[in-house]
Image (cartoon, rainbow, N blue to C red):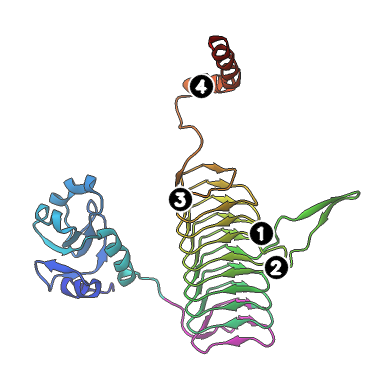
């Protein structure tokens, strides 16, 4: 049965004000359009204002200046989206693993596992692994030799940590993620490509989240470094010796090539590509499908690429694009003649 909270309880937990029936019982969260009685909704974008008069939600999180638009119970806050995000913790129905080790788990030599950690079915730990308090390793997780996993970290089924990976406290690593595979390092030789063995590791700071199917390669010599609070979406590729600063967020299918440094509080939208061996300063925001080809030393928003259009129009524009150099040379010649 879903946990129920009163409107007054949630307001107190958020440090927010409320209007209406403080005893109103709430058992879940939903959108304005789909909410049912007993559920709490929110409005963060004014374009959804029209749904306030139609929603069946028992209560809504609203800004004070929009309170008059909704006649029912409400939580009042200047940041409804942040309040919604915080309340998802209260209504999350995921059942955490129980402390202890499943009998099918395989534990290597000289491991240190806190009594409060949960080691699920068919988990494999190498030698000299350190597992902190409250850690949850779900079914099929593989952790290589010499890894350490900090307090409260949760690793979802079938994620893999290679050897010598350091994971901080309260991280989340989702299913299918691979942390510490070899970076793409090869040197040409007379006999073909010569493998450069990757001797570094990977460091994940506190509060890092790694999405499903994401890969973070180990460093060639120094560690690949993901700092505190970084959030990485599904199917992202982070190459060897990349360094990512605190609280940066990277959306799905982005790729960052080797030895690139990304600053703090950056955002990369879906499909962004970043070449290797460049530096990106703090506070840079890169829009979807942009290819970053050189260092960025000024904060701000950056974009590349062309917007979609009909195929017929796109083909015409593609022809014009190929003619730009010729047109530029002709204009330069005309300017010279004019002078």
Q: Which residue is mark 3?
A: 299
Q: Please tell me which of labels 1 and 3 falls first in the chain.
A: 1
Residue at the image position 16 percent from the left and 56 percent from the top: 56
User: What's the magenta bit mostly, secondary-structure-wise?
Assistant: loop
User: What's the residue at 12%, 74% (across, down)?
Assistant: 23
Mark 1 / mark 4, whichever is N-terminal = 1
Closest to the observer, 255 or 121: 255
**Residue underneath mark 1:** 240
Q: Of marks 3 and 4, which one's residue comes earlier in the chain?
A: 3
Q: Which mark is residue 317?
A: 4
* Pointer 3 local density, CA inside 10 Å: few below 14, some 14–19, many at least 20: some
Q: Disc 3 vs disc 2: Cβ atoms closer than 8 Å?
A: no
x and y percentages locating residue 67 in the rendered image: 12, 57
1 and 3 marks in contact (CB < 8 Å): no
Q: Position of residue 297 (x, y in %)?
A: 52, 50
Q: Are marks 3 and 4 in contact (CB under 8 Å)?
A: no
Taking depth in this image into account, of 272 and 61 the one nearest to the observer is 272
Structural distance between the alpha carbons of marks 1 and 4 = 38 Å
């Amino acid at each position: 049965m879903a946990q129920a909270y009163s409107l007054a309880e949630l307001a107190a937990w958020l440090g927010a004000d409320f209007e209406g029936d403080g005893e109103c019982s709430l058992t879940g969260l939903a959108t304005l359009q789909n909410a049912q009685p007993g559920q709490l909704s929110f409005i963060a974008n004014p374009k959804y204002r029209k749904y306030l008069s139609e929603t069946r939600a028992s209560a809504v999180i609203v800004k004070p200046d929009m309170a008059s638009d909704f006649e029912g119970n409400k939580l009042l806050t200047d940041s409804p989206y942040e309040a919604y995000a915080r309340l998802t913790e209260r209504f999350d129905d995921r059942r955490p693993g129980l402390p202890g080790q499943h009998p099918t788990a395989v534990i290597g030599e000289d491991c240190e596992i806190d009594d409060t950690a949960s080691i699920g079915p068919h988990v494999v730990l190498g030698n000299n692994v350190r597992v902190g308090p409250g850690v949850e390793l779900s079914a099929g997780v593989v952790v290589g030799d010499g890894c350490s996993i900090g307090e409260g970290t949760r690793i979802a089924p079938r994620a893999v940590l290679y050897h010598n990976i350091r994971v901080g406290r309260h991280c989340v690593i989702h299913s299918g993620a691979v942390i510490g595979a070899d970076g793409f390092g090869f040197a040409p030789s007379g006999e073909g490509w010569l493998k450069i063995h990757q001797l570094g590791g990977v460091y994940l700071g506190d509060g890092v989240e790694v999405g499903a199917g994401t890969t973070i390669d180990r460093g060639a010599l120094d560690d690949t470094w993901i700092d505190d609070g970084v959030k990485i979406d599904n199917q992202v590729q982070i190459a060897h010796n990349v360094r990512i600063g605190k609280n940066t967020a990277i959306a799905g299918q982005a790729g960052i090539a080797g030895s690139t440094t990304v600053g703090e509080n950056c955002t990369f939208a879906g499909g962004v590509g970043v070449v290797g061996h460049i530096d990106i300063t703090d506070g840079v925001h890169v829009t979807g499908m942009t290819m970053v080809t050189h260092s960025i030393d000024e904060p701000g928003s950056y974009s590349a690429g062309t917007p979609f259009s009909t195929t017929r129009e796109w083909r015409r524009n593609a022809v014009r694009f190929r003619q730009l150099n010729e047109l530029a040379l002709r204009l330069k010649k005309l300017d010279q003649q004019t002078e």
